[in-house]
Image: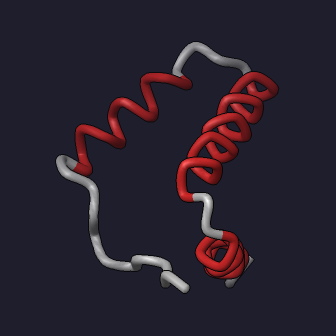
């Protein structure tokens, strides 16, 4: 089973963040939530490994 990568792994993280925010800039709260859900499902499908996805969900849930 592959493990979730917790190390920085995005080329140009600041540029990525700016692009992510720009994609949501003109959206109301409902459309922002829909955008985020769709993006999450697209990326989860790309990852595909249920073990990695389970580990990511547990890591995201920690501290909430």
Examine the rendered structure and indicate whether residue 42 appears above or below residue 56: above
Q: Quadrant of the image for the N terminus?
A: bottom right
Residue 42 located left or right of residue 64 = left
| Nearer the observer, 40 or 51 | 51
Split into 4 quadrants, where in the image is the C terminus?
bottom right
Q: How is the image coloured?
A: secondary structure
Q: Residue furthest right?
A: 30
Name the side, left or right, on which 11 lies relative to 41.
Answer: left
List x then y, in percent, for residue 20.
Answer: 44, 34
Which residue is the extreme one toward the front? 1
Q: Position of residue 16 (x, y in %)?
A: 31, 40
State the image coordinates of residue 57 (x, y, percent, origin top left). Answer: 70, 72
Q: Is residue 51 above or below residue 33?
A: below
> What is the count of numbered marks?
0
Instruction: State the residue at coordinates (49%, 81%).
Output: 2
Is 24 rendered above or below residue 38? Answer: above
Viewed as shown, does residue 23 lie left or right of 10?
right
Q: Residue at x 55, y 25 (%)?
A: 24
> At which x and y percent is residue 12?
18, 47
**In the picture shown, does residue 28 fall above or below 8?**
above
Residue with the most extreme top position? 26
Q: Is residue 46 left or right of residue 54?
A: left
At horizontal 57% and vertical 13% (from top left) the residue drawn is 26
Q: In the rendered image, which quarter is residue 19 located in?
A: top left
Q: Would you identify the image quadrant in which residue 10 lies? A: bottom left
Q: Nearest the camera: 34 or 47?
A: 47
């Amino acid at each position: 089973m592959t493990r979730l990568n917790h190390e920085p792994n995005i080329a140009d993280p600041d540029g990525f963040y700016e692009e992510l925010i720009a994609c949501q800039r003109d959206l109301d709260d409902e459309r922002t939530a829909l955008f985020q859900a769709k993006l999450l499902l697209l990326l989860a499908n790309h990852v595909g490994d249920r073990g990695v996805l389970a580990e990511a969900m547990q890591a995201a849930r920690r501290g909430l």
